[in-house]
Image (cartoon, grey):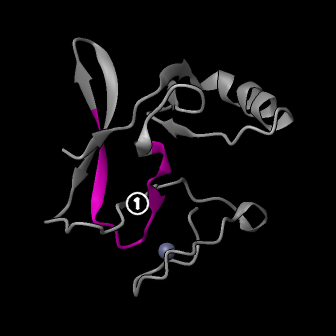
Amino acid sequence: MVIEYAGTVIRAVLTDKREKYYDSKGIGCYMFRIDDFDVVDATMKGNAARFINHSCEPNCYSRVINIDGRKHIVIFALRKLYRGEELTYDYKFPIEDEDNKLHCNCGTRRCRRFLN
Ligand SMILES: [Zn+2]
């Protein structure tokens, strides 16, 4: 285990409203979707995990873990990590059409060119 993606668990239907609010205040938005129903919002209450970037060839992975009936997102190492090495995991965004594609800048050999 490397770190928990800490934040407030909110219902997925609230994300658009919150994103718009953060945008209007110039606050960078950090959210991690757990499933169709819940999202961890790390924007106002979170930790360093929210700054971990995506990579198509990552050194970590995320898992949703149930602890006493509560969902937690935890980042685990895929292999031995070296001091000073950047941590990354695959965001696994759902595939979207051409108009909504996000370019990937991970720069790895196996880069898929898009995050979604
Ligand atoms: Zn990539």
Q: Nearer the viewer, residue 78 or 84?
A: 84
Q: Is residue 51 magenta-colored?
A: yes
Query: Which residue is under mark 1?
Result: 90
Residue 45 percent location from the top left of the image: 52, 25
Residue ID at (28%, 65%)? 59
Which residue is farthest left? 80
Quadrant hosting residue 48 = top left
In the rendered structure, the answer to whether residue 39 lies left or right of residue 76 reads: right
In the rendered structure, the answer to whether residue 81 lies left or right of residue 32 reads: left
Q: Is residue 9 magenta-colored?
A: no
Q: Which residues are magenta?
A: 50-64
84 vs 29: above or below: below
| Label 1 environment density (alpha carbons within 10 Å; few <14, some 14–19, many ≥20) | some
Q: How many numbered markers are drawn?
A: 1
Which residue is farthest top? 68
Which residue is farthest bottom? 109
